[in-house]
Amino acid sequence: MVASVGATLLAAAVLAACGTGQVGDTGTSGAAGNKKLVLIPGVKAEPFYISMQCGAQEEARSRGYELETQPPDRFEAALQTPILTGAIANRPAGILIAPTDDRAMAGPMKQGRDAGVTMVEVDTALQDTSIAVASVSSDNEQGGRKAAETLATLVGDRQGSVLVLNTIAGTSTTDARAKGFEQEIAKHPNLRYLGAEYTNNQPAEAAQKVSATLSANPDLIGVFATNLNTGEGAGTALRNAGRTGSVNLVGFDASPKQVEDLRNGVVQALIAQDPATIGRRGVEQAVNAIEGKPVQRRTQTDLVAITGQDMAANEQYFYRTQC
């Protein structure tokens, strides 16, 4: 997250121990009076997670809970794991986490569950659905389908190739977006799907992948970038090649930079999530579990496709850089 919210990103290790209650079949956790929650996003300095934090803080405050937030410096399980284990050691009532790997984070999250801490997934999720009491995310396959539908509309009846830029293998959200895109693009025979390229979530690598694809496939007319970093890299490559606009770029998320690129015609459409609602619903489910109330195992939030023509009507979906 950006430096302007650094004051809110307190280390989870300062949380005071508050009881030793165990997670039971009802989903309750912690001793009576434990009102501490920890949010562990996927990475710092990303407007999506800042917006999620803002929503989570608002919901926690309204329910009488304290929320501490501590993101890793990069979207890596190796960096997120010690943050999680430190939080578990201090026994908050609940932890909301965006697992950075759908397999590697299973063990550390299971430790939290077994220690009696209510675990809730926000944004990303594990393959193992038995660890977290609830999972809240966008309907990412739907988002991928929206991206394909939007791209097909933008290119009209033209024939050409289309590319997907993914992030890191094992990231549940972007893998689902790529899957949804692939399913929908198959319905448009004029568009030749080149497959998905992984970029290690690095803009420079995304730019290199697009540049190489342009050289090998001069008929490239569309790119779907599955997150902020891949979109930034794709935009750079298209500008450098003088192909901005002639290659339609559909991005995912609505950070200030992405919104600016949409306004300036670098990006032709954005598929925006609702991260603040993900944060609010995550806290809602965590508190319900802690207090022994009914919990909804899976919650999916809506997405919206935004083009340059309807930006003003969709400003509520633009991401924040501070709470």
Image (cartoon, helix red, strand yellow):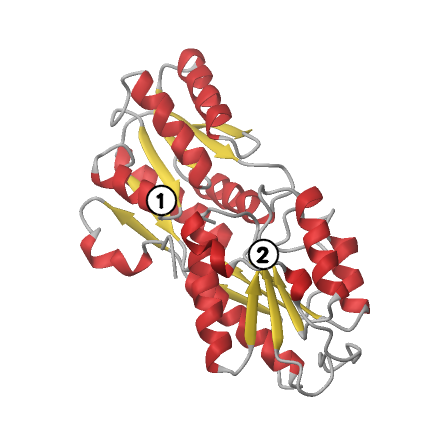
Q: Nearer the viewer, mark 2 or mark 1?
A: 2
Q: Secondary structure at mark 1?
A: helix
**Amino acid type at mark 2:** Gln
**Residue 120 - label:** none
Instruction: Determine which residue is flagged by label 1.
Output: 149
Which residue is more in the foreground, 222 or 99?
99
On the image, which quarter does residue 26 sit in?
A: bottom right
Of marks 2 and 1, which one's residue comes earlier in the chain? 2
- Quadrant holding the C terminus: bottom left
Reading the image, the residue beneath label 2 is 70
Name the kind of residue labelled 1 in the image.
Glu
Locate residue 209 relative to residue 36 in the image: left or right.
left
On screen, 246 above or below 86? above
Q: Is residue 103 visible?
A: yes
Q: Residues within 10 Å of mark 2 (few under 14, many from 20)?
A: many
In the rendered view, does 52 fall on the left or right side of 76? Answer: left
Circle 1 crowding by C-alpha within 10 Å: few under 14, some 14–19, many from 20: some
x 35%, y 38%: residue: 250
Residue 100 pos. (x, y %): 63, 47
Residue 130 in sight: no
Q: Residue 54, percent across and down?
A: 43, 64
Cα distance, mark 2 to mark 1?
A: 37 Å
The outermost residue toward the top is: 215
Q: Are marks 2 and 1 in contact (CB under 8 Å)?
A: no
Answer above or below: position of 203 versus 259. above
Question: Dot 2 lies on which element?
Answer: loop
